[in-house]
C-alpha cells in the first residue's frame, strides 16, 4: 500500500500561496456554516512519529475561529481510563453539535502504538477493530463528520527528523525510546498501519493518506480533504441554527471612567511587535508545559469589544495541543442542574496546559444579575464564591488572569454597523446585541462592582483599552507574557 505512494511529491512556494489563500478562506466559512447547522466534526491525525502531526494541526487551526474547536492530545491511558472500556475516553471527547474536535493521535493508538508495544493482546485485536468501526459508525449515523488523516514519511526521513529534534535541548524531550524503537522496526509498524487501514477504511469514515515529506504539499492536501468533507456535510445537512448570548446596578462608574480609550498603536509598529510577542509566547508556552504550570485566562467585555481578535492573536503561534479555548454561552439544561461554577471547574486545565475562556463565570454577576436569571442573594454571594474558586486555582499553582475588553458606546455602534454591512461578518451580530445596548448603564455599573469585588493579587483584572484593536491585542499579549515571566522567576 505505502509502496505505491509517491513520497517525492513537492510544491513550490508560489503554488502553495496561490492554493492556500482560497482554501483558508473557505475553511473559515465552512466552520461557521457547520456551527450554524450544528454539525459536529472530528479530525483525527495519525501517522509515523515525527511526520508532523503537531505542525499540521497548527497550520489547520490558523484558519479556524479558536472558540469553535478543541485539540486533544492522545497519550497513554491513565489509571482511571484503564478502568473503562478503551473507547470511553474518546466518547467523552466527542464534539458537541457545531464544534470541531481535532485529535493528535486517536482511538487508533490501541491498534498501533499499544499493539507495537505489546500492550494490546493479539487475541483482543479483532474486538478492538470491531469496537472502533462501531464507534465511528454510530457517530456518523448521528451526523458527525469524521475525517481521518494518516501522515506518511519514509524511514530515512523519520530518522533524520529524530536526529534534528534531539540536537536541540528544547525539543529533545519529544523523542522517546518508543519513537526510536518504531523507527528501528519501521517495516513492522508500517504493516500494522496497512492492516489498520484495510480494516477501517469505511465510506462513513474514510482514510486519507498524506505524503508528508514536503510540508507545503502536505498542508494543501490536508486543507483540501477537510474542505471537501465539510462541503459535503453542509450540502447534505438540514437548515437549523441558533445562538444565545445574554444582563442592574447603582454602583459608581469611576473605574471605567478613568480608562484612556484614546490609546492607539500604528499599524506598522503593531505588526512588528506582534510578531516578536507571539514568538515569545510560543517559547513561554513550552516552558509552562515543561514546568507543569497551568494558566487560566478569562475574557469579558462589551459586545464587539475585541475578545475574539485578542484570543486569536494570543494563540496564533502557540502549540494547539497545549491550550483550549472555551466559548461560554447560556448554560444548558444539564449545566443549570448543577452549581453555576460546575461547568467551569470541568473546563479547568491540567498542569502545564492553558484554558482560555471567551466569557466566564462572571456571567453570574453581570448577565444573570441584570436579566434576573438569579436572585439578589445569589449574585451577591457569587463574589465570594468566585474569589474562592480563583484562590483554589492559584493555591494549586495556576496563573489566573482576567481581561475586561473596554470600548465606549460610540465605538461599539460603529463596529456593529460595520459587521452589518460586511457579509463575512454579519453572522457576528444579533438583535440581542442591539438590545443589550439599551442597558449599557446597568452593565457599566455591574462591571465596576465586579472589578472592585474580584480583582485580587493572585487573580487580577486587567482592563484593556479597546477602541484601538492593535493596542488592545498587544496589551493582552504583553500582560500574559509578563505574568508568565514573573512566575518563572519565582
Image (spheres, helix red, strand yellow):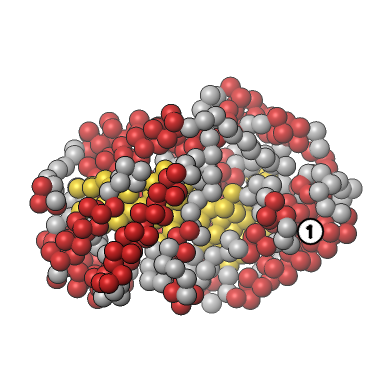
Percent of width and height locating residue 3? 10, 51
As rendered, which of 352 and 94 lies closer to the eye?
94
Q: Is residue 80 above or below residue 424?
A: below
- The residue at 19%/38% (across/down) is 12
> Could you tell me if residue 287 is visible in this image?
no
Say what secondary structure mark 1 lies in. helix
As rendered, which of 57 and 80 lies closer to the eye?
80
- The residue at 15%/66% (across/down) is 188
Given the current orientation, which residue lies at the most extreme top position?
421
The image quarter in which residue 170 lies: bottom left
- The residue at 52%/30% (across/down) is 238
- The residue at 48%/58% (across/down) is 91
Q: Mark 1 = which residue?
A: 452
Residue 87 shown left or right of residue 35 in the figure: left
Percent of width and height locating residue 131? 37, 60
As rendered, which of 193 and 57 lies closer to the eye?
193
Percent of width and height locating residue 273? 45, 48
> Could you tell me if residue 489 is visible in this image?
yes
Q: How many marks?
A: 1
Residue 152 shown left or right of residue 84 in the figure: left
The image quarter in which residue 281 lies: bottom left
The image quarter in which residue 77 lies: bottom left
Percent of width and height locating residue 468? 60, 39
As rendered, which of 125 and 464 lies closer to the eye?
125
Disc 1 residue crowd, few under 14, some 14–19, many 20+, Cα 10 Å: few
Amino acid at each position: 500500500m505505502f509502496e505505491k505512494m509517491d513520497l517525492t511529491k513537492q510544491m513550490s512556494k508560489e503554488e502553495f500561496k496561490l492554493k492556500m489563500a482560497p482554501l483558508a478562506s473557505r475553511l473559515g466559512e465552512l466552520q461557521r456554516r457547520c456551527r450554524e447547522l450544528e454539525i459536529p466534526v472530528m479530525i483525527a491525525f495519525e501517522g509515523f512519529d515525527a511526520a508532523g502531526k503537531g505542525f499540521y494541526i497548527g497550520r489547520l487551526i490558523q484558519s479556524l475561529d479558536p472558540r469553535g474547536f478543541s485539540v486533544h492530545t492522545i497519550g497513554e491511558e491513565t489509571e482511571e481510563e484503564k478502568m473503562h472500556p478503551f473507547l470511553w475516553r474518546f466518547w467523552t471527547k466527542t464534539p458537541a453539535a457545531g464544534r470541531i474536535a481535532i485529535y493528535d493521535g486517536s482511538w487508533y493508538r490501541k491498534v498501533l502504538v499499544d499493539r507495537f508495544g505489546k500492550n494490546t493482546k493479539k487475541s483482543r485485536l479483532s474486538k478492538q477493530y470491531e469496537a472502533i468501526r462501531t464507534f465511528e459508525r454510530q457517530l456518523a449515523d448521528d451526523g458527525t463528520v469524521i475525517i481521518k488523516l494518516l501522515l506518511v514519511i519514509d524511514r530515512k526521513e523519520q530518522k533524520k527528523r529524530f536526529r534534528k529534534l534531539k540536537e536541540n535541548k528544547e525539543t529533545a524531550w519529544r523523542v522517546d525510546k518508543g519513537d526510536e524503537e518504531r523507527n528501528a522496526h519501521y517495516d513492522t509498524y508500517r504493516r500494522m498501519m496497512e492492516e489498520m487501514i484495510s480494516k477501517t477504511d469505511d465510506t462513513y469514515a474514510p482514510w486519507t493518506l498524506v505524503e508528508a515529506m514536503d510540508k507545503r504539499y502536505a498542508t494543501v492536501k490536508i486543507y483540501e480533504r477537510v474542505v471537501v468533507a465539510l462541503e459535503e456535510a453542509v450540502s447534505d445537512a438540514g437548515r437549523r441554527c441558533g445562538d444565545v448570548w445574554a444582563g442592574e446596578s447603582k454602583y459608581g462608574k469611576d473605574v471605567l471612567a478613568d480608562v484612556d480609550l484614546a490609546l492607539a498603536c500604528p499599524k506598522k509598529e503593531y505588526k512588528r511587535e506582534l510578531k516578536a510577542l507571539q514568538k515569545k509566547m510560543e517559547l513561554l508556552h513550552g516552558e509552562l508545559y515543561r514546568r507543569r504550570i497551568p494558566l487560566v485566562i478569562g475574557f469579558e467585555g462589551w459586545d464587539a469589544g475585541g475578545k475574539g481578535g485578542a484570543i486569536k492573536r494570543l494563540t496564533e503561534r502557540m502549540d494547539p495541543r497545549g491550550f483550549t479555548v472555551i466559548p461560554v454561552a447560556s448554560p444548558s439544561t444539564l449545566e443549570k442542574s448543577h452549581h453555576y461554577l460546575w461547568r467551569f471547574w470541568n473546563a479547568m486545565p491540567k498542569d502545564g496546559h492553558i484554558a482560555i475562556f471567551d466569557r466566564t463565570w462572571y456571567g453570574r454577576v453581570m448577565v444573570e444579575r441584570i436579566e434576573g436569571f438569579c436572585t439578589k442573594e445569589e449574585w451577591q454571594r457569587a463574589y465570594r464564591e468566585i474569589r474562592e474558586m480563583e484562590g483554589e486555582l492559584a493555591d494549586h499553582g495556576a496563573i489566573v488572569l482576567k481581561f475586561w475588553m473596554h470600548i465606549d458606546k460610540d465605538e461599539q455602534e460603529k463596529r456593529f454597523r460595520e459587521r452589518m454591512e460586511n457579509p463575512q461578518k454579519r453572522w457576528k451580530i444579533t438583535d440581542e446585541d442591539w438590545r443589550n445596548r439599551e442597558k449599557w448603564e446597568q452593565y457599566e455599573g455591574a462591571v465596576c462592582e465586579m472589578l472592585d469585588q474580584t480583582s485580587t493579587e493572585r487573580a487580577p483584572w486587567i482592563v484593556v483599552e479597546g477602541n484601538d484593536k492593535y493596542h488592545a491585542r498587544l496589551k493582552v499579549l504583553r500582560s500574559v507574557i509578563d505574568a508568565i515571566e514573573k512566575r518563572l522567576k519565582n
